[in-house]
Image (cartoon, rainbow, N blue to C red):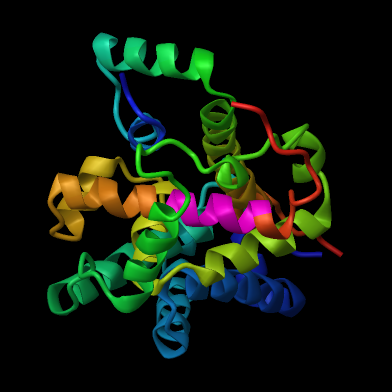
Amino acid sequence: MTSGSDRLENDKDYLVGLRRDMLRFTRLQLRDEHLAEDVVQEALAAALTGKREFEGRSALKTWVFGILRNKIVDAIRVRSRTVNVGALADEEAGLDEAFESLFKPNAHWHPEARPRDWGDPEAALRQDQFWVVFEACLDHLPANTARVFMMREFLEFDTEEVCAELSLSSGNCHVILHRARNALRRCLEKSWFAGEGAPSC
Amino acid sequence: MLNCKEVTRRLSAAQDRELSLAERLQLKMHLAMCGGCRNFSRQMDLLRDACKRYIDKEIRHERRPD
């Protein structure tokens, strides 16, 4: 058995599994197969080159994913120079319409659209099947909405930083995050929590 | 008084920045009366939790050496 950063070179099974996890994570955020492959390749190359810097204080995978995080951010940054991440595409407009339809004209919930009681969330998070649904819901988000949301929640940027990196106004940034959260909440409610009872307001 | 639509925006904002005292009070008053928005609020918390947990599962979980 090899240990420490040598596993990157000597443990083929480890490397294959690691690469697969990195690809899945990157694909989810970049929504671009080729770009994701490139980014993962770059991150792995950087990890191999810099493997002497790995001090074993964190898990090897955590260290490699730290490198990957920076590569993903670079890719998003480059793309945001040519793509307007804040643009309202049909998909986003559709989500906004769906959101508006949850409310009566006085901006209170339609009774049938009231958010439901999801019961014990811990119980859900413990089930493997929940994570399949969660990933599917993330995947259903429009690409740009997903990028902003994941930069905030997965790459753990402050909202201010996300806005700045993607050249979004703070107002638009909040609108996009609200759109993402509501879409995810609705998706989870429909696909996972549908069995729970509707609340009374 | 805030309406439900405004409350969803504020609950989302609460995930991104510190709300002012006035903003929090308005929110509290609405949530005290509205079960739908209370559920929405809990759902936002669950989303944040789920994202953190997802990262933990995906990234911080070290594959066991064979």
Quadrant in which residue A83 is drawn: bottom left
Is residue A183 found inside the magenta-colored segment of the image?
yes
Coordinates of residue A143 in the picture (x, y in percent): 39, 73
What stretch of residues is rendered in magenta? A180-189
Front in this rendered view, residue A164 or A107: A107
Q: Residue furthest front?
A: A105
Q: Is residue B36 left or right of residue A99?
A: right
Quadrant in which residue A81 is drawn: bottom left
Residue depicted at x 12% and y 51%: A169
Residue depicted at x 75% and y 52%: A194
Coordinates of residue B20 in the picture (x, y in percent): 25, 15
Is residue A10 found inside the magenta-colored segment of the image?
no
Coordinates of residue A59 in the picture (x, y in percent): 62, 49
Q: Is residue B42 above or below residue A124?
A: above
Residue depicted at x 15% and y 56%: A168
Front in this rendered view, residue A184 or A197: A197
In the picture, the quarter occupied by the C terminus of chain A is top right
Residue depicted at x 28% and y 42%: A159
Q: Is residue A6 above or below residue B34?
A: below
Front in this rendered view, residue A166 or A107: A107
Coordinates of residue B42 in the picture (x, y in percent): 58, 30
Q: Is residue A90 left or right of residue A65?
A: left
Q: Tell me which secondary structure the magenta stretch mostly adopts.
A: helix
In the picture, the quarter occupied by the N terminus of chain A is bottom right
